[in-house]
Amino acid sequence: MESPSVTVNGRTVPLDAVAPHTSALDWLRGEGLTGAKEGCAEGECGACSVLVARPGITTPTEWTPLNACLMPAASLDGQEVMTAEGLGTAKDLHPVQREMAVRGGSQCGYCTPGFVCSMAAEYYRPGRCAHNGDPGAASGGDHHDGEHGPNGFDLHALSGNLCRCTGYRPIRDAAYALGEPGQDDPYAARADQAPPAPRATRVVVDDAAFVRPVDLTETFALLAERPDAALVAGSTDWGVEVNLRGTRAPLTVAIDRLPELRTFEVTDEHVEIGAALSLTEVERRLDGRVPLLDQMFPQFASRLIRNGATLGGNLGTGSPIGDTPPALLALDAVVVLASADGERQVALADYFTGYRQSVRQTGEIIRAVRVPLPLARLTAFHKIAKRRFDDISSVAVGFALDVEDGVVRRARIGLGGIAATPIRALRTEEALTGQPWRDDVVRRAAEVMSREGTPLDDHRASSAYRAAMLGQFLLKLYAESPSPQEVPA
């Protein structure tokens, strides 16, 4: 096993003396790279974002922005990291840094390096369309709309970066002014080379250990020896537990690069999604195949979080306010659980047993999620939160209905935020199934839906508000749905 190390801004730095619970942000700052800052310590502000070379979808490698405050430094073993300091210097600014400077995109500068890293990732994103002409033009280009620039820049790339003093217009102006990377750009050329290969990792400092096993067999052996081990993939939950709650598991096992957990398969019967694929990878691999998930992805936290977060992690935490369970419940998804004794499949509707509890047994891990085919014809994902993006839901609902000849033949509705676990709206499904898809029926079903679950009063929303929103969601679905004759076959 090689000695743990990471390549940062082209320089190889050892990791063997780094404590397993040290975040990548704290470690980088300890190395003198203080551009990345801690703003929230929970992945909401983006001041800590850095670039990591990860396997691409259309190119061998992509520069992926991630929250350094959430990642264990040890998880970067064998990886390549670029910080704002590595992109350019005061005498030789990177194009992103230059545009941020000349267009007034920075005042106090605290958040600027994080913006620069997220913006640089979008700058190098494969397939970003350049504007034919002046890249700083105010209009033009096939992709210019409220959330895309004339140069193809997707503002969602910055959805996880918050600025408290500059204001977003000059930052947007800088993003929309970017052209294409030059032919001699070394970071663009890096995309054509193979990504860093996953490698086995073991870091032990004092009484804590971080291990990245080579395969599932080794993973199961570790779990059999240490059932109290903490499993991490995207580490978006791990980082919050460590930073804000002081959690210190004696053993952390990284399963994010296990090939058995990174499967993606489309058959006539189902779509299988590996539990360790990031949500960004899932979104791009699906490429519109599952419209309900397409609606859910942009509302799930931010791009920075989705670049790390996984379906396995979102289901594994058992949170009643996770965004993926309502959508997956509506899709009749199945969870594939694996252990040293083999695999078993559990319908997601039967997976949750209590608050942050599930049928998953000691020694079992989520290997994949399967979405059965064919899909329902009428689907939607609705979410209420205090912010439009980058926020936890107060209520989330996934709809999947088959409407044929003006009649609801089958209904599946997943709910989040209104009970101790994500649940199906079984009474509402019963009230709709076999009934005409028309106004009076939907209104009666909406009344039923407003009484589903046991919503609570908390700082995000009152019980009465949550109940009211449930009924409104169904009315909204009906109002926005095509007529029965227009529902796609």
Image (spheres, grey):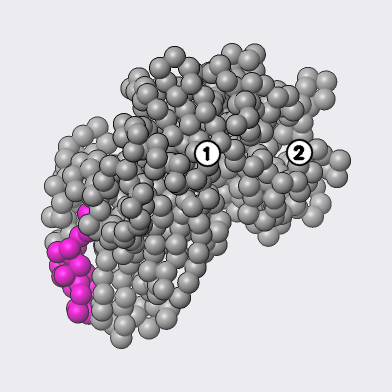
Upstream in sequence: badge 1 or badge 2:
2
Q: Position of residue 123 (x, y in %)?
A: 70, 42
Checking the image for residue 187, the label placed there is 2
> Which label sits on residue 112?
none
Q: Is residue 51 visible?
A: no
Q: Main secondary structure of the magenta part?
A: helix
Q: Is residue 438 magenta?
A: yes
Determine the residue located farthest toward the right in the rendered image.
184
Which kind of residue does numbered mark 1 sit on? Answer: Leu
Q: Which residue is mark 1?
A: 304
Residue ID at (32%, 75%): 402
Location of the C terminus by quadrant is bottom left
| Residue type at the position of mark 2 | Tyr
> Callout 1 environment at 10 Å: few (<14), some (14 to 19), or many (20+)?
many
- Report the span colored magenta: 423-446
Say which of marks 1 and 2 sits in front. 2
